[in-house]
Amino acid sequence: MAGTAQQTADSGKAPQERGTVVVYPGNAQRAPCSHESATYCEVARRLATIKGYDYGGLFDASRTYDGPVYFVPSDTFVSLEAARALGIRHEHHLFGGVVPYPFIATKTITHALPAPGAKAPPGWSPELAQRVHDVVLPGYSVFSIDDARDAGAALLRQGAVRVKMASGIGGLGQWVVADAGELDACLDALDAQEVARDGLVCERNLAQVETLSVGQVRVGELLASYCGTQRLTTNNAGEEVYGGSDLIVARGDFDALLQLDLAPPALQAIAQARAYHAAVLQSYPAMFASRCNYDVAQGCDEAGRRYSGVLEQSWRIGGASGAEVAALAAFRDDPALASVRASTVEVYGGDANVPADAVLYFQDVDERAGPITKYSTLAPHANP
């Protein structure tokens, strides 16, 4: 069928014949900007090399592809039917993930509703919130302004609350409120229809927080698991946003990662991310993903109480994907290599210095972000 991946089998095993890697922007929740599009294409090129496939650029629905097609979508597929129409039936068909309902791809699945009668989208699983309760921060997910007021008021009894739009990325679309007046002002400024459609998270706010990234990627026969930290930077508008990730990546599953010499906070984050991932798969068994990333926040609230918990998941190409792909390529090139350090860097402004050995993903003026430079680096990891 024209425009459909001619997959070899649905057994879950990686196809052996030569195929084509394509970028698929058709499921994007919003139109990618220049630096995002450039990153997607460069990641896809490198995945093609890893798999021994050809790089086919953007997916062309009018073309009949010879051999299997491997997709690099802009976002998580939020419909099983849409993915199947392209021939995507399991994790070996894409770099990303497929879920049966749109809200599963957002941070709203992390928390329970504030009350049994609160509004929720079709497919909502109350059991998931129960399963992840001990590995997430105190908080609620809501799909109406009224429910958000109730959720925020309940959390304010213990301190400041962070309000997060489900559609926000890179640290944007978030506000911290310290009292009922600030909560009302924040909620009154939101679009009620957008909240009803996408959802909102009200969560315990942490100070001096560190965000760890825990994840796993599978491409063909290669499997890698990682843990690391995120860096914040200031964008061209003066806002504090995501500035890159520094990862320790192990060949193999999470058990292989745990064999490395990691600090206790990292071990806690890995345990929480694993529990979260298992709970999601148990609650939504139809979903699948080859790229799984979990943000884990660790810090203290204003009363000095320490928390550690999963903030959200990502089953799509993300900010750390340049580092993930660099690590996979290193493992492919050296079968004896057990672990590496891999980083991604995002620098705003026009004076970024790119290391000579870095892989440059973008260095130009983006139509939305302004001047921005994005690159990845790879370094040895010495495990005592």
Image (cartoon, rainbow, N blue to C red):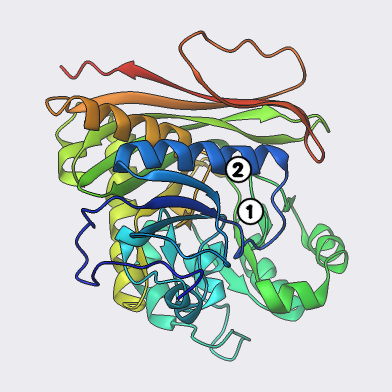
Q: Residues within 10 Å of mark 1 (few under 14, many from 20)?
A: some
Q: Residue at x 28, y 42 (%)?
A: 225
Q: Is residue 329 visible?
A: yes
The quadrant the N terminus occupies is bottom left
Q: Is residue 176 above or below residue 11?
A: above
Which amino acid type is shown beneath numbered disc 1? Gly
Q: Residue at x 51, y 8 (%)?
A: 356
Q: Which of the marked residues, 1 or 2, is nearer the chain's N terminus?
A: 1
* Residue picked out by circle 2: 302
Q: Secondary structure at mark 2?
A: loop
Q: Residues within 10 Å of mark 2 (few under 14, many from 20)?
A: some
Q: Could you tell whether 59 is left or right of 170 in the image?
A: left
The quadrant the C terminus occupies is top left
Q: Nearer the viewer, residue 134 or 230?
A: 230
Q: Specify the label residue 159 is tagged with.
A: 1
State the CA–CA distance, disc 1 to disc 2: 7 Å
The location of residue 340, given as percent across then percent down, is 28, 24
Residues marked 1 and 2 touching at CB (< 8 Å): yes
Q: Could you tell whether 236 is left or right of 37 in the image?
A: right
In which quarter of the view is residue 229 placed?
Answer: top left
The location of residue 220, given as percent across then percent down, is 25, 49
Q: Is residue 60 above or below residue 124?
A: above
Q: Nearer the viewer, residue 240 or 148?
A: 240
Q: How many marks?
A: 2
Q: Secondary structure at mark 1?
A: loop
